[in-house]
Image (cartoon, grey):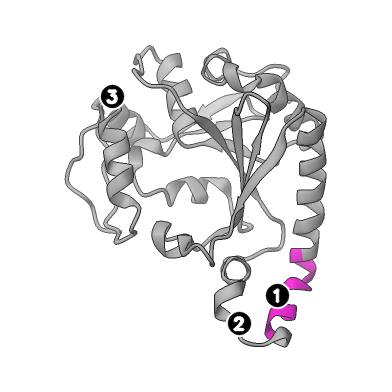
Amino acid sequence: MANSINDSIASTLSHLNTDVLQDFNKVFPNMGVVAGSAALHGYMQQENKNPTWSPNDIDLWIPLKGVDQLLCFNYANRHVIFETDQELDMVMWHPAIINASALHKKITEFFAKHRMAVKGASNLGKNNETKKYKLTNIHSVWTFTNEKNYKIQVIYVADTPLSNVVDAFDMDCVKVSYNLSKNIFELSDAVDMLINAKQMYLKSTNAIATPERIAKYESRGFINNKSKST
């Protein structure tokens, strides 16, 4: 297990208190990775690619043991797809969902010790975010903040290799993860080439959120090149 966070990711996340991530890895070893814009920013710093923007928060992706993709989808959309209490109970009392709730309680208690409280949770089904972001493998999203409004988003996902989660991102330029236990950035050579060229390389998607994500990364200097099919 790594003794310290990589200097590049530490610099990227300094305003978010990197000690929290180090302690998280000690308490929950081999459980999650940082992925998305914070990991991309840290990797660009490490490779002297000079990012001109800063991430607003970090996304910490955590797989839930025994929760497959169908169960994940049913849980996230439970408020809109089930018509009877019996159907809802089959999801809510599923052993893997109960275990997931217990894990979330422990993680919430961990962040509370670091003075980071739950600010909100994404109610994926009620807020139509499964359609907005084409989420099929996300159980829930919880935002933890401190008094300075620094944010860590904990994203619980189906029981799948985290490399599969990252590979499902809608644009290749953000397919970068930072492995807390190994203390390394993980990405493919193809993604590295895209980052060098400042290209997004989008998957074809009709997710409602795609245009705003394109605009976000255009503002960060990335080129909106031709989409590829899924």
Camera-side residue of 62 and 128: 128
Mark 2 residue type: Phe
Tell me which numbered mark, 2 or 1, is placed earlier along the sequence.
2
Quadrant placement of the C terminus: bottom left
* Contact (Cβ within 8 Å) of mark 2 with mark 3: no
- Image quadrant where residue 51 sits: top left
Point out which mark residue 82 bears. Answer: 2
Q: For mark 1, give the secondary structure.
A: helix
- Image quadrant where residue 134 sits: bottom left
Point out which mark residue 34 bears. Answer: none
Mark 3 residue type: Asn
Say if residue 156 shows up in the picture: no
Q: For mark 3, give the secondary structure.
A: helix
Camera-side residue of 109 and 9: 109
Marks 2 and 1, Cα distance to the nearest angstrom?
Answer: 10 Å
What span is in magenta? 87-97
- 118 is within the stretch colored magenta: no
Q: Position of residue 15 (x, y in %)?
A: 58, 18
Tell me which numbered mark, 2 or 3, is placed earlier along the sequence.
2
Camera-side residue of 126 and 23: 126
Nearer to us: label 2 or label 1: 2
Mark 1 residue type: Val
Point out which mark residue 91 bears. Answer: 1
* Contact (Cβ within 8 Å) of mark 2 with mark 1: yes
Q: Position of residue 101 (x, y in %)?
A: 77, 57
Kindly identify which residue carries mark 3: 196
Tell me which numbered mark, 3 or 1, is placed earlier along the sequence.
1
Q: Position of residue 18 (x, y in %)?
A: 65, 20
Q: Is the residue marked by circle 1 packed among few (<14), some (14-19), or many (20+) residues within 10 Å? A: some
Q: Is residue 15 above or below residue 100?
A: above
